[in-house]
Image (cartoon, grey):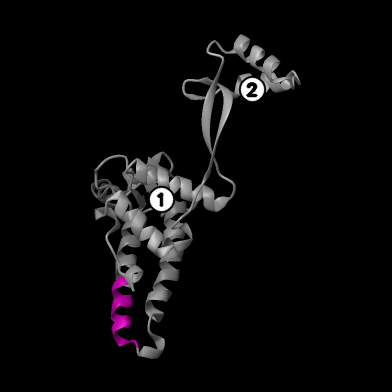
Amino acid sequence: MCCDVDFDKESISPSGLFLVFTAKHQDFMNYHLLAGMAIAPTRDGNIDFEVIDNVNADKVTDKKEQLAIVDKLNEKGANPVSFTMLQDFADFLYFEFAELLKQGLQIRKCRLCEKYFALQNKHKTLFCDRIYSGKRTCKQVGNKQEYDRWIAADPALQEYERIYKARHAQMERDEQKESPADSGRAKQAFGEWSKNVRKLRKQYFAEEISGKYLMEKIYV
Ligand SMILES: [Zn+2]
């Protein structure tokens, strides 16, 4: 089937991505968002809500009187403003997705915190700029050189790396021995263990637990 083909999302043009998306999610093939036009005061390209609040506070309902108040409060007065109506979650997601495509932004999952982020430029970064622990961002922690330098001075992290690699290698060996009946069992067990220890490592980075505690727990 067309849609089951695995593809490299980052090598496809925005139009290509849109086609793949609509082929996979046919509800969005002819999706429409409601658009409208209103008269509103604007400032720096955005709706001036401060002025609108003032008009509302005066409880004036006559349109002409409202415009007169707006003219007094905002030097440019009111302008025609077009807007898009997002009425439910699907509308919101569709709008957001369309904007990303229009702006040619790429989304990637951060290798460390596993949250999504928009690539700011063509750099092939694997990590986002969110704070991961203390004052360090995922990008800083994830930077290999920096991380290596950091663990070189930390016995708990060295032990973490050693155990993590050993458990991963063991999982790969166990996978080879699996019969079809228990296929995937080793990977699942490793997945559960690693999810837990990655959480502990994060707590250690944030200085919520001690290195001793981290070392004790990774053997479990
Ligand atoms: Zn991150």
- Circle on res. 116: 1
Foreground of the two, 165 or 179: 179
User: Residue 17: x, y in percent?
Assistant: 33, 55
For residue 88, above or below residue 82 = below
User: Residue 193: x, y in percent?
Assistant: 43, 69
Residue 218: quadrant of the picture: bottom left
Residue extent of the magenta highlight: 168-178
Q: What is the number of callouts on the image?
A: 2
From the viewer's perspective, is 142 left or right of 72?
A: left
Q: Which residue is mark 2?
A: 52
Provide the secondary structure element on which disc 1 rests. Answer: strand
Provide the secondary structure element on which disc 2 rests. Answer: helix
User: Residue 88: x, y in percent?
Assistant: 59, 50
Residue at 38 percent of width and 80 percent of height: 184
Task: Count residues near mark 1 (Cα–Cα under 10 Å), then give few for <14, some for 14-19, many for 20+.
Answer: few
Foreground of the two, 45 or 126: 45
Is-magenta flag for residue 173? yes
Mark 1 CB within 8 Å of ligand 1: no
Q: Amino acid at mark 2?
A: Ile
Looking at the image, tell me whether mark 1 or mark 2 is earlier in sequence order.
2
Residue at 66 percent of width and 13 percent of height: 69
